[in-house]
Image (cartoon, helix red, strand yellow):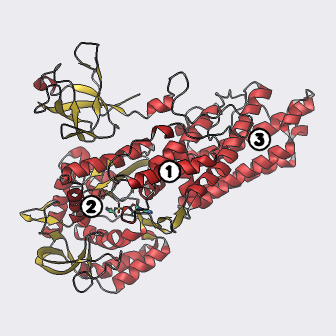
Amino acid sequence: MSRKFYITTPIYYVNARPHIGHAYTTIACDTIARRQRMFGADTFFLTGTDEHGQKIERAAQAAGKTPQEFTDEVSAQFRALWQRMGITNDDFIRTTEERHKKRVQELFRRIRDNGHIYKGTYTGQYCVFDELYVDAVGPGAPCPECGRPTETVKEENYFFKLSVFADKLLQLYTEQPDFIRPETRRNEVMSFVRGGLRDLSISRSTFSWGIPVPDDPKHVIYVWLDALANYITAIGYGSSHKGAQEAFQKYWPADLHMIGKEIVRFHCVYWPAFLMAARLPLPKGIMAHGWLLFEENKMSKSRGNIVRAETILDVLGADALRYFLLREVVFGQDGSFSFDALVQRYNSDLANGLGNLASRTLTMITRYFRGQVPYPSAAFSQSAGDNAIAENARKVIVECNALFDQYQFSRALEAAWGLVAAVDKYIVENEPWALGEKQDEESRSRLATILYTSAEALRIVTALAHPVIPDATSKIWSQLGLGDIRKLVLPELKWGQLPLSTKLGNVEPVFPRADKSAIERMQKMEEQQRGGSSTTQAQPDASTTVPPVATQAAAAPAAKLAVTVPDGKISIDDFAKVDLRVGQVKAAEKVKGADKLLRLEVDLGTEVRQVVAGIAESYAPELLIGRKVVIVANLAPRKLRGLESNGMIVAASPEGGKAVLAGFLEDVPVGTRLK
Ligand code: MSP
């Protein structure tokens, strides 16, 4: 049986739309999850949204929406962004889902039955922004975490006996030094716990947007207990279904909770204490990374200094964002984001670095060896330089893997790109283009060795970088004629495995150079956004669909980043952006006052979506129940007659005739993707 690996991101608050701070954590986890899969681990990668509590209730009010409408909308934005970025999460949990609510109540009961909960009255300060009980005195006293004014709360609450867990927690941190990483955070937590722990209020009774306390529904469960529990509810804790129970047995405890440094206390103190109280196993480790700063401050909605991932995806693509964040920021420390640095890094490391190495090597193999990987033959064709590259590559494999294992992404990438630079130099020094002009046996043999060596080094870097830049490396892999990179078993990666005579695929540039206007364009897109609403889904500006690109420096055909190609056709990548899925209609009804519209609830396997469809003239609602349909699952939500539609049902619409739903002759499981 394969080793399992369970990794989680924090679940993101839905008071604001996603930005690259959220993307940062998600990208780091996605990279780790992809690597684990390449190492053969049975990996489960969880993310989701945190939707209860006063902060969200107030944000919904401010937006003039019900909390449910509001959370549906923003949660869908997170989900759509992760899909667009190719994030490989295995599940996406929302704390407003029934499965979560029931299981949290089960956890509450269990902690209560184990004698760790009592009723009392809380009088003190509360920070709604951090959803944190604060040791401060007097109305308006600033929150020690965020500096915002706190509110005085006096209400009857349930309390958790946190104080009794102090010694056990200290023992945990001492016996398992890797439980909290990096070390600085571990030290902070230890001194916090040594300072003494007070019992924690774990319910609120002055608002209702939360999960009711079992047997006492006047109270809702404290949003942090609700939220932290997602890590177990999503994989089946508290479920009576056998499959869910088995999943919980299999994946819990988590191997890694990845978080930002501001939520260390909740994860490293409260969460293990809750689990100890419930007599459940503890996660194996918690890693806290630093903040992404923009204009010198933590990027956050409330500061109004966020950068949206969509802007970068539109102009440079997901790999550029992933690479930049993991290469530029030392993981664990704070790091600054700027468009200048992004474009500079993109051009130097991706367009001129890996992209250029790939296109010049593969183009020369195409030109001089009719697209087949040549044999590095005969003794006289070997030089010290060739062996140095092979040696370098062997070292890089070991070093890069070790650094990735310690989540030192920046250094791991630096090591891999050291090989790119070495091969570049090797190519320049050996001038294969000059050898290519000669026909004598020695020149041909030398040329073969140089190009084989370059292609093999390219293969190694491509394999190592795959978890970070999955799109580009998949393309380079297939251009190398190696097929599907997901089949690669990373621990088996060695120098010399590139099969001789491999027929290359079509050689195309993967990272077209970005010119200066890319920076201005991204800045403009963000400025426009800041002028507009911060919670509604932004529609990409038409002018941004064709990003500014210049031709790649190497011997390569014209760059290709544009969304449409001239004759109106779209590329397979563009088609892949449309998330078509099999859904099953669970409920259907006419929309009042609209002859053509039906309100449908469609099960997608992972969630039930509300979709408003213009098919009322073709189908009676009751005939649709149970029917399998095709749904465009990643369409931005929109409102029709005041109802939010989350997706679109695919139907043929004959001229002047009635709509006919697309369907299947054979049975097909709900949730299956069409591609
Ligand atoms: N909902 C809670 C977490 C509950 S987990 C059981 C929460 N949500 S959050 O949306 O405010 O932030 C969650 C995480 O997003 C942070 O811990 C961090 O991982 C990431 N980031 C949000 N802004 C960020 C930056 N500016 N920089 C880096 N990471 C950022 O807290």
Side of 571 where 201 appears, left or right? left
Q: Which of the two discs, 2 and 1, sits closer to the camera? A: 1
Q: Mark 1 vs mark 3: which is more N-terminal?
A: 3
Q: Amino acid at mark 3?
A: Thr
Measure the C-alpha gap from mark 2 to mark 3: 51 Å
Determine which residue is flagged by label 2: 227
- State which quarter of the image contains the C terminus: top left
Q: Mark 2 vs mark 1: which is more N-terminal?
A: 2
Q: Amino acid at mark 2?
A: Ala
Residue visible at 29% across and 35% down in the picture: 647
343 shown above or below 664? below
Q: Which of the two discs, 1 and 3, sits closer to the camera? A: 1
Determine which residue is flagged by label 3: 453
Measure the C-alpha gap from mark 1 to mark 3: 44 Å
Residue 5 visible? The answer is: no
Q: Give the structural element (helix, strand or loop) at label 3.
A: helix
Side of 146 where 104 appears, left or right? left
**Labels 2 and 1 touching (C-beta < 8 A):** no
Q: Is mark 1 within 8 Å of ligand 1?
A: no
Residue 32 visible? The answer is: yes
How would you rate the neighbour count of disc 2 (Cα within 10 Å): few for under 14, some for 14-19, many for 20 or more?
A: many
Determine which residue is flagged by label 1: 524
Q: Is mark 3 within 8 Å of ligand 1?
A: no
Q: Amino acid at mark 1?
A: Lys
Residue visible at 88% across and 35% down in the picture: 434
Q: Mark 2 vs mark 3: which is more N-terminal?
A: 2
The picture places residue 292, in percent across and down from the top left corner, at 48, 63
Side of 351 where 282 appears, left or right? left
